[in-house]
Image (spheres, rainbow, N blue to C red):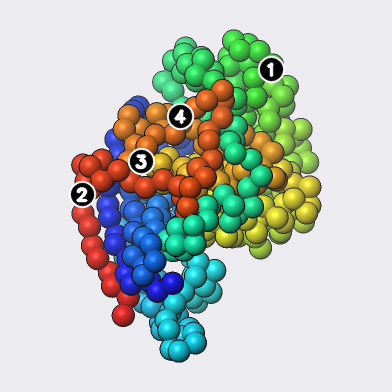
Amino acid sequence: MKLQGIELRRITMPLVAPFRTSFGTEHERDILLLRAVTDGADGWGECVAMAAPRYSSEYVDGAADVLRRFLLPALARHQESARGPGGTVGITASDVGHALAPIKGHRMAKAALEMAVLDAELRTLGRSFASELGAVAERVPSGVSVGIHDTVPALLDAVDGYLTEGYVRIKLKIEPGWDIEPVRAVRERFGDDVLLQVDANTAYTLGDARHLARLDPFDLLLIEQPLEEEDVLGHAELARRITTPVCLDESIVSAQTAAAAITLGACSIINIKPGRVGGYLEARRIHDLAVAHGIAVWCGGMLETGLGRAANAALAALPGFTLPGDISGSGRFYRTDITEPFVLDDGHIAVPAGPGLGVTPLPELLDERTTATEWLPLG
């Protein structure tokens, strides 16, 4: 398959309601999409970097810049050098990681490029993302991420609404000053049968271990990324001091870092976000590693459009994903998605079965949300 070029497309997606975490509040998403144009089929990728470097060091403008100046030229050189029989030029998704390896970091930008190439490749071959990754399910259980609210009653109303919709797991965002009492209120209101977990997004330190131990009586599925992403040793010590299972998110950026965290006892659960780890092929490697070590995994979300949501659903259908992921219906974040909407059905989201991602942007909706486009030819 010859990659002829990449179209960078910026779109704006207003959220149905502000989404507040320990690192800030989002009102809309500024999203970078990639369209890979090949001699077989076009493919789509979605970059999950945020507008500002708060969740990670990456941000949308930086992702566009590194794609333009470094990643695409590196991929073009690799494609040109990888001539097949008769001098034909071509590339596969598995080549992308090797071609981009000399460029340090920028995993979200790399993941978006790999996703676009993989989508194009699979559409050309008539195979789905799910079958390529090794999915064993046709639908996946759906959890929902609930942001920080101004008041506990407002939080309870939100949780009640999500449970009524059918979500099978609730994740509460927490931060110092918004942790014990919100969790207690949700448990008291909805009972012990609700699958409940919390996500701190690095808001605490090891000095807060005694405070975080106060969450233990609430029988949580896990506490996600309580400490700074670099503090893997701190997470290992925290795991010894509390009984709530520790899950790592921001700390896991590759299979290598996952192996180190597992060896150190820093986590018993891993949240796999393909954008954070450099792509879906690396995400699958982390899944395989975790399964080999008896570590549970689940698929996190980054407020993706239907494109990223389709790919995440395919990943979450792998056998090691034993906990519900943040793969909500499209309506959780967007009144109108750019693809056909994903709809919650009996607490589950269907895994697309068509070629590639199994979904494509609807042209009229994509054009309505587009703020800028740029064509970057290869060669």
The quarter holding residue 199 reads top right
Question: What residue is drawn where x is 72% and y is 56%?
Answer: 289
Which image quadrant is residue 80 in? bottom left
Q: Going 44% across and 23% down the picture, which residue do you hit?
A: 149
User: Residues under labels 4 and 3: Cα distance?
Assistant: 12 Å
**Figure disc tally:** 4
**Which label was assigned to residue 371?**
2
Look at discs 4 and 1 and give the one toward the viewer: 4
- Mark number, residue 193: 1
User: For this rendering, which residue is in front, 273 or 262?
Assistant: 273
- Mark closest to the chain's N terminus, 2 or 1: 1
- Which three-letter amino acid code belongs to the residue tagged 4? Val
Q: Nearer the viewer, mark 4 or mark 2?
A: 4
Q: Position of residue 343 (x, y in %)?
A: 45, 29
Residue at disc 3, secondary structure: loop
Q: Which residue is mark 4?
A: 343
Identify the amino acid type marked 1.
Asp
At 39% from the left and 42% from the top, the residue drawn is 305
Position of 149 relative to 77 (above/below): above
The residue at the point 50 percent across, 66 percent down is 93
Spatial CA distance of label 1 from label 3 is: 34 Å
Per the model, the C-alpha gap separating discs 2 and 3 is 17 Å
Q: In the image, residue 108 lies at what x, y percent?
A: 45, 57
Residue occupied by mark 3: 339
- Quadrant into which the N terminus falls: bottom left
Task: Check disc 1 and report its element: helix, strand or loop.
Answer: loop
